[in-house]
Amino acid sequence: MTARPDILFPLFAEVTALSGVGPRIAKLIARLAGPRVVDLLWHLPGGLIDRRFSPKVAEAPDGRIATITVTIDAHFPPPVKRRPYKVACSDDSGSLQLVFFHGHGDYLAKTLPIGQTRVVSGRIERFGKEIQMVHPDHMVTVAERSTLPTLEPVYPLTEGLTAKPLAKAIRASLERAPDLDEWIDLAYLKQQQWQDWRAALRAAHAPDGEAALDASGPDRARLAFDELLANQLAIALVRAHQKRSPGRPLTGDGGLRRLVAAVLPYEFTVSQGLAIEQIVADMATPRRMLRLLQGDVGSGKTVVALFAMLVAVEAGAQAAIMAPTEILARQHYDVLAPLASAAGITIECLTGRNKGRKREAILAGFAGGQTKIAVGTHALFSDDVEFHHLGLAVIDEQHRFGVHQRLTLGAKNQSAHMLVMTATPIPRTLMLTAYGDMDVSKLTEKPSGRKPIDTRALPLSRLNEVVEAAHRAMNEGAKVYWVCPLVEDSESLDLAAASERYEALKSQFGDRVGLVHGRMKGPEKDAVMAAFSEGAIDLLVATTVIEVGVDVRRATVMVIEHAERFGLAQLHQLRGRIGRSDRASTCLLLYAAPLGETARARIEILRDTDDGFRIAEEDLRLRGAGEVLGTRQSGMPDFRLADLAVHGELLAASRDDARLILARDPRLESKRGAALKILLYLFERDAAVKYLRSG
């Protein structure tokens, strides 16, 4: 991979390179925006303070920001430490008290000398006849008045970081932003009436009114397009590289598929049959297949994947299926092993837990070609894993792996076909940003015999009734999930909430209650899940770590505490843990009253439908793309400037532009091509740059 261009070095320096940013502030900035200068450029203001309002003291309304010229009359240091320091001032209309908590007397006496005129700016507070300004934002002499910002951007903050040092660091980062050659098509730039990159960036950080804070305003739209173009160009480069890599046509005689079909206890749904046809047709061509199989929880993706793998085995090749966690890999193995056995095929499971001779024996089976189907976790990525001939790689729950990570498994054999599966229904706009033009098969029906899940919303005040209902269900032989709330996106706080609920339920139901959370080691988590699935645990308290796809057929009750804190797609995923048999299932959404508008809409949609694709589109509309797949899931691009709910048209335009660019200048060798390479580095899509040189 080529090195980052020199012109961008100042932007990729640590924030400590900026004047006034020491280690303490750097740590807070890193938590808020990121550790480097470029992260501050993308941290745009969320509000605006207008300091142009300059009334007389008597006319200053309560709660309004005002900039007032006053004479300093007297200082009143506090008689005891805990009381505030007050400074009395006035103009010809009335008196104003400046109030300072933990005020330093020497500094205030020097800044606000008695008898002098000062200009103060801050929020007015009225208490009866007294007019106050607590901690004025600015205090300057009349001569310095022109230095006051008339319109001051307000940035999102984090605990411990105040506005002034952050604003100063952002100003310093903007000073480092270089002039860069234009990468947007000039006709399109003119049509949109956009400024150049640097001017748009500076304008976005200096909004001239409320309208400039809108994501659809010209400067923010320009920056969003830059980010989307970098994303689409990177995906197009990866795709072009994959298309250049020839695939090996794989066609089978159908013999193994017939043997497996004969032992399946059900018929395929229409969409399963169609998906298998599409995959079989793709694998028969000399071009590498790259297909996404989207299907809601329980729609039968694993069996579709098996039939794809059987095509590879019939054609004399091997197949591998990779899951994001050990528990899911084992579950795939448990489903596939008896079916493979019916067809006389050797199947092995490789996870990080396999050590020593056992691991060596599994690896020998892969390398020698005796093992036809490999199941595993990212352990299949390991350098020591070699296949005799890998014809198909299947990746489950793709959004849990990065786009480039999934290419690593394909690299085990450059001509291997690839099938990517997800149970997270992805809206079309997100599909484009994560997968480009990947071919898609959708599984739309539920397997026959499944009953709809009864979804109800209840206020938290009825918690005791819910505990009683869970108890009744357990006594009737059901298993119950109890999901604890998300707390400020903090794993330790999530864990505290779950531990508290676990202790409360354990005091009632004893050893019938188990707990799983993200900090548990794999084997420990697996043991609890196994006890819940087959053993003595009937009620499982969990943070949102309950794995996608884990199949506990006796689980028929799902309780979600503080449902208003979860996204729609997440609630839908959690609800999908139940209703996996022919028994009636219930999902109880506990919420803290009163419900906000978005939370109410979310819960109503969930009660109306169990169509994951409709839910995903609604989720995108209600919350925006950054939230849709949950903040902790990787793989989906994390946009800093683009908002897919607002910038859908820009996404389509950037996608078309990326295709056109590579059709005209596949190696980015023109003047615009060189600017586009810098764009890829600027938005850290440089992993795609290597594909300009290869293939």
Image (tube, rainbow, N blue to C red):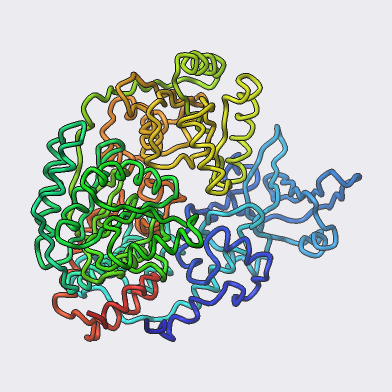
Furthest-right residue in this view:
79
**x%, y% of residue 436?**
23, 60
Determine whether 223 is above or below 617 in the image.
below
- Residue closer to the observer: 132 or 577: 577
40 relative position to 239: left or right: right
Residue occupying image coordinates x 38% and y 72%: 199
* Residue 461 visible in the displayed image: yes
Q: Position of residue 460 (x, y in %)?
A: 53, 22
With 501 as the anchor, is 83 left or right in this view? right
Query: Residue 480: x and y, percent?
Result: 47, 25
Residue 66: where, in percent of width, then height? 59, 50
Examine the image and state in which quarter residue 259 appears. top left
Residue for point 50% across, 32% down: 483
Q: Which of these two is toward me, 626 or 498?
A: 498
Q: Nearer the viewer, residue 611 or 207?
A: 611
Q: In the picture, residue 524 is in which quadrant?
A: top right
Quarter placement of the C terminus: bottom left
Where the N terminus falls, by quadrant?
Answer: bottom left
Q: Can the viewer see residue 227?
A: no
Q: Residue at 73% x, 45% y: name it.
A: 95
Residue sitting at 44 percent across and 20 percent down?
478
- Along the horizontal axis of the image, is 10 left or right of 298? right
Vertical position of residue 410 compared to residue 499: above or below: below
Q: How many marks?
A: 0
Front-lying residue, 487 or 329? 329
